[in-house]
Image (spheres, rainbow, N blue to C red):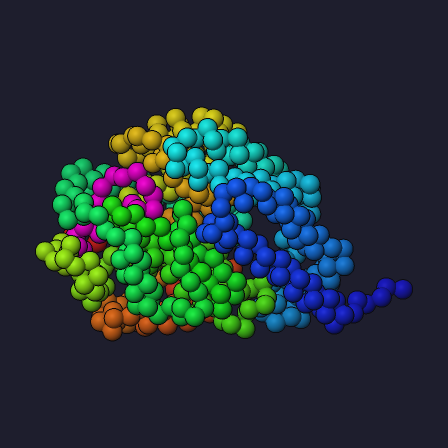
Amino acid sequence: MHKEPNIQKEMGFYLEQRKKILAMHYVDFVIGWDTQTDAAENSILANSEQAAVISEMSYNLTTDPEYERAVGVLYEHRDELDSVLRHEIEVVYKNIADTKKIPVEEYMAYSELSAKAYPMYVRAKNENDFELFRPYLEKIVEFCRKQTVWLATDTVKGYDVLLDMYEPHYNQAKYDKFFNVLRKKLVPFVKKMTANPTEVPEWTKQTFAKEKQREFCEYLRDVMCFDKSRGIMKESEHPFTSGFGTEDVRITNHYYEDSLVSAIFSAIHETGHATYERQCDPTLNGTFCSGGASLGLHESQSRFYENIIGRSRAFWQVHFGKLQQVFAPQLDNVTLDDFVAYINRVEASFIRTEADELTYPLHIMLRYEIEQKVIAGELEVKDLPKYWNRKFTEYFGITPPTDTLGVLQDVHWAYGNFGYFPTYALGSAIAAQLYHYMSKDFDVEASLKTKTTKKINAWLKDHIHKYGASKYPDEILRLATGEDFNPDYYVEYLINKYSK
């Protein structure tokens, strides 16, 4: 006789196991933060074995037979659950199945490898020595290629497996369609605008004290209404945002004394990410639905604040005086128009994170093309520097003089984040689509006269942030705009802005 499962009992077990898994997520969060901010290189290497042990504990919690059974029962009865828990169970059900496909010994070894790879990447970048990092990257690529085999389904195979990890429901076919729109409508315009770049102003060639940069970046966090009692800003080689729920959201920055604006726009970008995390519905804390819905949607928030807001004249009309005050007398003879023109200057350049809005998507298209070839086995790690330089020259007409300015500039591959880069371009395009609809509800630029982004934050909270990860990102975008993703808003925004 078939016995009906006790749903309440399985629910109770699931909720208890979820607490343990989230506790392990917190451990990973703290270790990752420490690794990239405070820990010394040799300390990271010495403690890399602990990463393998912790990953095994996480693996065992996720693949525990009782937990799997509880999730299976809840999945079968998901129509009886509230909408948030139903979505969570659907995602967890898939995650368990995917995790079980990865051999535990491979899972552990990769966690240890990742812990060792980061400090070697930093050293290789700083010393302009790709060979220092190459053995680690080769093993990372080997694991990522195995992942595409382990996690393949009838409908999701190869590089699509990795793309789906970062942006659910997106694959090469959809990204190719998106990038083809950019190639057809935007690339000719980019080439026209970069043909005769303006001279770099002399005032930008000064030395800008690191402490003063940090002071102004802290000011910007206040402008963006970030609650500093719930998040700090520290330093790392590559700026990033990390957090655990709405009450602990941290960002990092990197300061270059020969560049005034690099840290400024990193601070705006990362605080954009942090604002998303902080404005999720707090009732989602303690669930797997807390935090951003996807990396593409996350990047739409950071790129929105960094570029659409942060590079606008309306924004600097109210904050340039403070910048002049902090950097007096260095900026005494620089006008608002001088500064706005400089931060929107278009030029083919080497560094993705410091690229202007117009050339930025080309940096992503380059990485997307390279990743496709690497994962398909058509390009080996040892050949990456030469291939990067050749393709970069094709895209931009300039050749990176060093690997530090070329293939070593991004940290993402050190963590095995193949499939991540396309979300940056997707996020930029989504930002333009959101801006179009936000502008229908209120005068966005006029709202900046209040000297904060409070009204903008509120709109994004109501239309995007409050959902956290309780829905799929494409569903959230439809709720916010009434339509599916449409790259035409992005092309129109860029051409209108830079034609002026």
Count of numbered marks: 0
The quarter in which the N terminus is drawn is bottom right
Is 283 positioned to the left or the right of 73 in the image? left
- On screen, residue 220 versus residue 285, left or right, reads left
Residue 480 x %, y %: 41, 66
Q: Quadrant of residue 297?
A: bottom left
Query: Can you say whether 298 is above or below 164 in the image?
Result: below
At a point 52% along the width and 62% down the height, the residue shown is 244
Res 188 seen here: no
Q: Is residue 62 or residue 365 the one in the foreground? A: 62
Residue pictured at 43% horizontal, 70% vertical: 229
Q: Is residue 26 above or below residue 44?
A: below
Q: Looking at the image, can residue 262 be seen?
A: yes
Residue furthest out toward the left: 333
Residue 88 image point, x, y percent: 60, 63
What stretch of residues is rendered in magenta? 339-358
Residue 175: x %, y % from top left: 43, 45
Residue found 79% across the figure and 67% down from its top? 5
Is 205 or 444 nearer to us in this picture?
205
Question: Residue 126 lies in what quarter of the image?
Answer: top left
Query: Image point 44% across, 40% down: which residue?
Result: 122
Q: Main secondary structure of the magenta part?
A: loop
Q: Is residue 455 left or right of residue 281?
A: left
Would you place residue 434 above or below residue 126 in this image? below
Residue 9 falls within the magenta-colored stretch: no
